[in-house]
Image: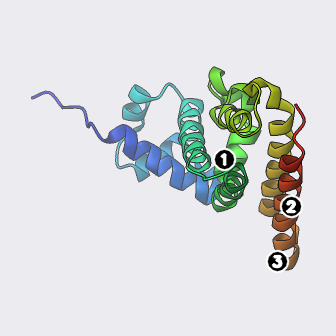
Amino acid sequence: MPRHADPDLEKRVLDVAQKLWRGGGDEALSMRALAKAAKTNTPAIYRRFRDRDDILRALMLRFRNRYVEAIQSARSLEDSIERYIDVGVQHPREYELYFTEGALRPAESRTLEIGPGFVWAQAKCAKRFGGSPSDYAPLVLAIWALAHGTVSFLNSKALPPQRSTQLRAACKDAVAALLQQPRR
């Protein structure tokens, strides 16, 4: 009797890969550990994913989708930055994976200008201030740099807790200042 493919295996493998990645990063995510934790075998994983990089790529897309969803559900640009910081701090390993493994990213998201969050923020600026979304690339890049720096610093655990709170507030104030006097 032929075996039937497990329709939930791909999701289960990615869920387990995400848990392994969160728990130990690069060292924790081996194909053997993944197969064991997903209650399958390595050939079954290789039938669905070309290699380990393919799994990492899928994890990156999952994280990007979570990020974009959080940002795009915000009431305002200012609120989107708060959400950006929250998601980045809540998922530090995925954040690090997404922003340090650029070669693994799918081709359509290798540049900031065409990432969905970046495009969304440009469109929000154009709607709020007038002009074309592309006019706001420098502004959105400056805001992203502030948010990214804040998340990276917070995730580094280099700051004492009271400074972490101050850093978040400083980022929020700087974004507000940039949005008060937007330059196109």
Q: Secondary structure at mark 2?
A: helix
N-terminal of the pair, mark 2 or mark 3, is 3
N-terminal of the pair, mark 3 or mark 1, is 1
Residue type indicated by callout 1: Asp
Q: Residue furthest front?
A: 130
- To which residue does mark 3 refer? 161
Q: Which residue appears at 81% of the width and 30% of the height?
A: 137
Q: Residue furthest top?
A: 107
Quarter of the view holding residue 3: top left
- To which residue does mark 1 refer? 26
Task: Determine whether 27 is above or below 99 in the image.
Answer: below
Q: Which residue appears at 87% of the width and 71% of the height?
A: 166
- To which residue does mark 2 refer? 173
Residue nearer the viewer, 3 or 184: 184
Spatial CA span between label 2 and label 3: 19 Å
Residue nearer the viewer, 103 or 24: 103
Question: Viewer-nearest of labels 3 and 1?
Answer: 3
